[in-house]
Image (tube, coloured by chain):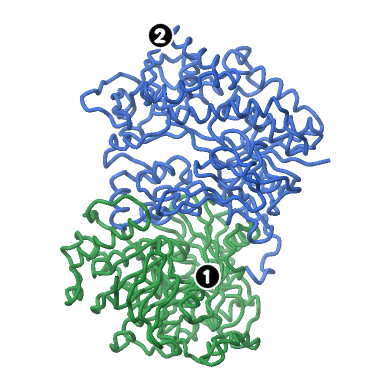
């Protein structure tokens, strides 16, 4: 089995990368050690945010994504509304590959073989589920006097770099969110913030990728790499070797471990988050509503906003309440104290929720990089080894532009924005990387913590 | 004095509580219901007693003896006590994360992992791992309970720990969907029986009882006792399957104490009342204008697929359906207990689970009925209190385990039932997900992950959190149970909790920098 590129990880980032590469004419295989769309991509709220990002490269990427997602959502809906094999994407007719339908069928057979599930029927003609893209806008509020001015100042700094920002009076905020706690001290409306259903979005990108010829191999773990000299020649998996000269690590919080298996290294760590889901109710929350108090409460001099509570409705009629951030490794056990704090913060925003039953709590691990920027590009120490990871809580929103940015670099096309700040070779990451000669020392500088560009417990 | 926490006050839990007390322990007995006895001994509330109670319940005397025996300072009984979460605070790695069953993609469920140090000789049949004597409660377990009426706010929150825990959380009945099952007048057999036993309400005048398993018989009896006319009991298992399940080594049934006489009693009862009991048949459709008016009964092949041309229409205003039971596993899973390939809590002959100090008894260890529950509860209670199980109980337990296996062999669900579904048959009633959409979405996404199937179709995401439809969704899509964390049995939040109650538990708002 051979491919131009092997993408490791069938979450939303891997799906977006594979799709972009295939539409650019590459022959792509995605491998995942488990099932697609089932780890980090399936454990968030589906945030597409500009509001929580301070001016800088990540906000530039998020602004690009804010323009890109509506187009991508429409494109996916259009493509997937027709049966596979008929509506082939524009770029998918490039030479040297099997027709999309044939490729999709073969990937189906292979993933079934790997998963032990009986072969399935021919590709479906069912309309694909809606990805529920909704530019509903975000409203960030402060509920303390100390929190008010930092929130406004933060919004002004964002407006200066092109974020659409509307400062609201309490009355204006209540007009937009009638059930909001009236005791707010400041409120800012971000009309570019949006939401989508992250699992459907990931599946849609994967389905579209399959139509462009991508093979998705589930239940295959990457166990090593093959090289000739410095050049990558293949990826070893638990079910055979795939010949390739380019590998993209898109394994979310497990990217560090995968990089290590491939002979590289990347300081990606898991950061746990929990979300509460209420029973269905008539809609009483209309935007993404955030509590920006953390910022004021800590009197932090950091330039970014640390949101700590997010409340929003879903088209399913539930309300999602998030979210915590904890660095506790891959420990997935339930912590009552965490749930209780999420609940308490949510009630400060929407007191009416007090009697609402929470029916489910779920958690996941965000891929956290010490300088708080995604890593998108080739490893400067290992030619052919690429990364698309480290988006922390922003991976759903940034997936599409990440796929395009990685694809442009890998195929030598002109990227939509300068990739330099996201490269693994960026200075803010240097202290965390093992360098060419000192690999054996494996020394990670203690001083590294001070490089933490965006500070504290986000 | 050891403190033993018993969760669930049905036959197994009552039996465990009394046995633990008798062995010298202080006992806390919890149940989410407002009375004792569980589903099996569900009875009229004390303010409306009935002298007929003993005639309506099998083994009522046993219940009365157990209940009387609870009146003791050494046993604290908490009813309306809902366990909504179990926290494990032990070292990482001591939890079920390693112990939960795994299914390999190539060949179904692999044997559970048995911890090192276990002797092979200790292992019981069907891969149960015996885990040697260990002292104290493992995994740093804290049991979070809300006490008060289920639909009220401001319930009293308690966080309980103990020296040992006995899970006796039981099972709820499983109903396979069929066209028309959403109509008013269709009940799960368990709900119908609960109404009959607990409220003396018959769910209809002309009732059909259908599904699979010995449970259909007591349900029909309860309905009759509550005043309904049961027009027929339709058992999906065919005579050959019944023979296979029940005939080999029939003398073993004697060991299942009064199971034999109990079944004989039901059969006699039905003959006496002239209730037809038909094998190899199923209700494949319910019809009616706004509520059930008639049902379509068909003969089934060995795989439970209806045989075309055998359909018969029967007038009925109530249908009571049960196709078996689903054990309530969320709490044992939250505690880190190993779940076996059969998807019951793995226990050894002493009812020990894979977590030190944690025991399980009753239907969560295998569907064995009341006799198994009583014996297992007694063993679990004595062991949890630090005593030894009685030899007679250990002997009886072997008989009841055998009974559980026979039930499954004879009445276990066969895959052909899927052919009675139509594309518009609702599978998940909470979220109104029809079979066609479920199947086609799983195909369109090429998915084998239950998490993705649920989130792309919304099946199993509703208020019951897949308690009703979970196993059916797994069967229909081929997804799920491939990974333990994917199983519909896993519910870290074990019951709905009001946001206000949850917020009331916060102790360090804004103080914990890691949150």
Find residue B386 and report its image quarter.
Answer: top right
Mark in front: 2 vs 1: 2
Give the residue drawn at x 58%, y 27%: B400
Chain depicted in blue: B
Establish if B131 lies above or below A79.
above
Find residue A22 and report its image quarter.
Answer: bottom left
Which of A272 and B138 lies nearest the eye of the viewer? Answer: B138
Give the chain of mark 2: B
Residue B94 percent across, percent down from the top left: 65, 57
* Residue at mark 2 to residue at mark 1: CA–CA distance: 73 Å
User: How many residues crowd around disc 2 within 10 Å: few (fewer than 14), some, or many (20 or more)?
Assistant: few
Give the residue drawn at x 43%, y 64%: A33
Establish if B226 lies above or below A370.
above
The C terminus of chain B sits in image quarter: bottom right
Q: Seen in the image, is A263 located left or right of residue B304?
A: right
Q: Seen in the image, is A365 located left or right of residue A76?
A: right
Disc on res. B274: 2
**Chain A drawn in what color?**
green
Which of B291 and B168 lies nearest the eye of the viewer? Answer: B168
Give the residue drawn at x 42%, y 90%: A420
User: How many residues crowd around disc 1 within 10 Å: few (fewer than 14), some, or many (20 or more)?
Assistant: some
Disc on res. A198: none
Give the chain of mark 1: A
The N terminus of chain B sits in image quarter: top right
Residue A5 percent across, percent down from the top left: 32, 77
Residue B348 percent across, percent down from the top left: 63, 39
Establish if B458 lies above or below B62.
below
Instruction: Quickly name the residue at label 1.
Output: A170
Q: Residue furthest top?
A: B272
Residue B336 percent across, percent down from the top left: 61, 51
Please count the marks in the image.
Answer: 2
């Amino acid at each position: 089995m051979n491919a131009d590129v092997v993408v490791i990880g069938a979450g939303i980032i891997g799906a977006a990368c594979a799709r972009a590469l295939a539409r650019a004419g590459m022959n792509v295989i995605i491998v995942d050690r488990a099932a697609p769309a089932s780890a980090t991509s399936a454990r968030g709220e589906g945030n597409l945010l500009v509001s929580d990002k301070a001016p800088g490269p990540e906000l530039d990427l998020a602004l690009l994504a804010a323009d890109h997602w509506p187009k991508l959502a429409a494109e996916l809906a259009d493509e997937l509304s027709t049966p596979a094999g008929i509506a082939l994407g524009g770029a998918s007719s490039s030479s040297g590959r099997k027709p999309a339908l044939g490729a999709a069928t073969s990937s189906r057979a292979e993933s079934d073989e790997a998963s032990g599930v009986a072969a399935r029927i021919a590709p479906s003609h069912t309309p694909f589920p809606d990805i529920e893209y909704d530019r509903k806008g975000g409203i960030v509020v402060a509920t303390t006097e100390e929190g008010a001015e930092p929130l406004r100042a933060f919004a002004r700094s964002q407006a200066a770099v092109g974020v659409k920002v509307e400062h609201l009076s309490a009355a204006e905020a209540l007009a937009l969110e009638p059930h909001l706690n009236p005791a707010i001290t400041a409120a800012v409306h971000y009309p570019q913030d949006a939401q989508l259903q992250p699992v459907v979005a990931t599946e849609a990108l994967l389905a579209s990728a399959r139509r462009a010829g991508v093979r998705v191999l589930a239940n295959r773990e990457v166990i090593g790499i093959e090289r000739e000299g410095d050049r990558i020649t293949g990826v070893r998996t638990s079910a055979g070797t795939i010949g390739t000269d380019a590998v993209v690590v898109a394994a979310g919080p497990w990217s560090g471990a995968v990089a290590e298996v491939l002979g590289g290294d990347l300081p990606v760590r898991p950061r746990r988050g929990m979300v509460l889901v209420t029973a269905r109710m008539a809609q009483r929350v209309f935007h993404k509503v955030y509590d920006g108090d953390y910022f004021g409460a800590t009197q932090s001099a950091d330039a970014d906003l640390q949101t700590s509570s997010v409340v929003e409705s879903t088209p399913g009629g539930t309300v999602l309440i998030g979210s915590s951030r904890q660095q506790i490794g891959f420990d997935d056990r339930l912590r009552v104290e965490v749930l209780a704090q999420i609940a308490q913060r949510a009630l400060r925003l929407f007191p009416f929720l007090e009697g609402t039953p929470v029916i489910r709590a779920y958690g996941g691990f965000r891929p956290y990089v010490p300088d708080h920027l995604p890593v998108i590009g080739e490893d400067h120490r290992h030619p052919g080894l690429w990364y698309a990871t480290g988006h922390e809580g922003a991976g759903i929103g940034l997936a599409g532009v990440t796929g395009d940015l990685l694809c442009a670099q890998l195929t030598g096309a002109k990227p939509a924005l300068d990739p330099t700040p996201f490269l693994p070779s960026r200075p803010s990451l240097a202290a965390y990387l093992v360098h060419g000669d000192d690999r054996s020392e494996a020394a990670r500088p203690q001083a590294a913590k001070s490089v933490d560009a965006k500070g504290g417990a986000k | 004095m050891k403190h033993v926490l018993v969760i669930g006050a049905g036959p197994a839990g009552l039996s465990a509580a009394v046995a633990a007390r008798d062995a010298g322990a202080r006992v806390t007995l919890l149940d989410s219901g407002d009375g004792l006895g569980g589903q099996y001994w569900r009875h009229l509330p004390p303010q409306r007693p009935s002298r007929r109670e003993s005639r309506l319940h099998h083994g009522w005397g046993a219940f009365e003896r157990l209940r009387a025996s609870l009146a003791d300072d050494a046993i604290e009984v908490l009813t309306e006590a809902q366990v909504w979460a179990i926290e494990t605070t032990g070292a990482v790695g001591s939890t079920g994360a390693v112990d939960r069953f795994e299914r390999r993609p190539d060949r179904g469920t692999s044997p559970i992992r048995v911890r090192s140090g276990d002797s092979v000789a200790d292992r019981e049949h069907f891969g149960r791992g015996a885990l040697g004597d260990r002292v104290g409660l493992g995994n740093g377990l804290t049991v979070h309970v809300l006490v008060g009426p289920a639909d009220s706010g401001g319930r009293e929150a308690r966080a309980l720990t103990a020296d040992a825990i006995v899970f006796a959380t039981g099972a709820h009945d499983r109903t396979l969907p069929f066209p028309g099952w959403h109509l008013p007048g269709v009940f799960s057999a368990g709900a119908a029986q609960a109404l009959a036993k607990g409220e003396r309400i018959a769910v209809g005048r002309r009732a059909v009882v259908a599904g699979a398993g010995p449970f259909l018989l007591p349900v029909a009896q309860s309905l009759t006792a509550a005043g309904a006319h049961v027009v027929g009991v339709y058992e999906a298992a065919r005579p050959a399957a019944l023979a296979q399940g029940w005939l080999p080594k029939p003398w073993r049934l004697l060991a299942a104490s009064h199971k034999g006489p109990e079944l004989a009693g039901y059969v006699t009862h039905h003959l006496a009342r002239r209730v037809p009991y038909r094998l190899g048949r199923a209700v494949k459709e319910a019809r009616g204008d706004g509520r059930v008016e008639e049902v379509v009964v068909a003969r089934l092949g060995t795989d439970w697929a209806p045989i075309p041309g055998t359909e018969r229409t029967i007038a009925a205003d109530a249908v009571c359906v049960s196709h078996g039971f689903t054990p309530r596993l969320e709490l044992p899973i939250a505690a880190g207990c190993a779940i076996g390939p059969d998807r019951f809590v793995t226990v050894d002959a002493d009812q020990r689970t894979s977590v030190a100090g944690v025991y399980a008894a009753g239907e969560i260890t295998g569907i064995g009925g009341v006799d198994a529950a009583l014996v297992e509860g007694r063993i679990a209670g004595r062991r949890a209190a630090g005593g030894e199980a009685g030899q007679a109980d250990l002997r009886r337990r072997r008989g009841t385990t055998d009974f559980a296996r026979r039930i499954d062999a004879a009445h276990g669900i066969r895959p052909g039932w899927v052919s009675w579904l139509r594309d518009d048959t609702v599978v998940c009633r909470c979220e109104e997900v029809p079979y066609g959409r479920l199947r086609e979405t799983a195909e369109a996404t090429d998915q084998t992950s239950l998490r993705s199937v649920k989130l792309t179709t919304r099946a199993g995401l509703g208020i019951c959190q897949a308690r009703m439809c979970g196993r059916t969704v797994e069967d229909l899509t081929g997804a799920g149970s491939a990974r333990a964390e994917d199983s519909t049995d896993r519910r870290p939040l074990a019951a709905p909790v009001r946001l206000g109650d949850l917020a009331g538990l916060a102790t360090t708002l804004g103080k914990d920098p890691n949150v």
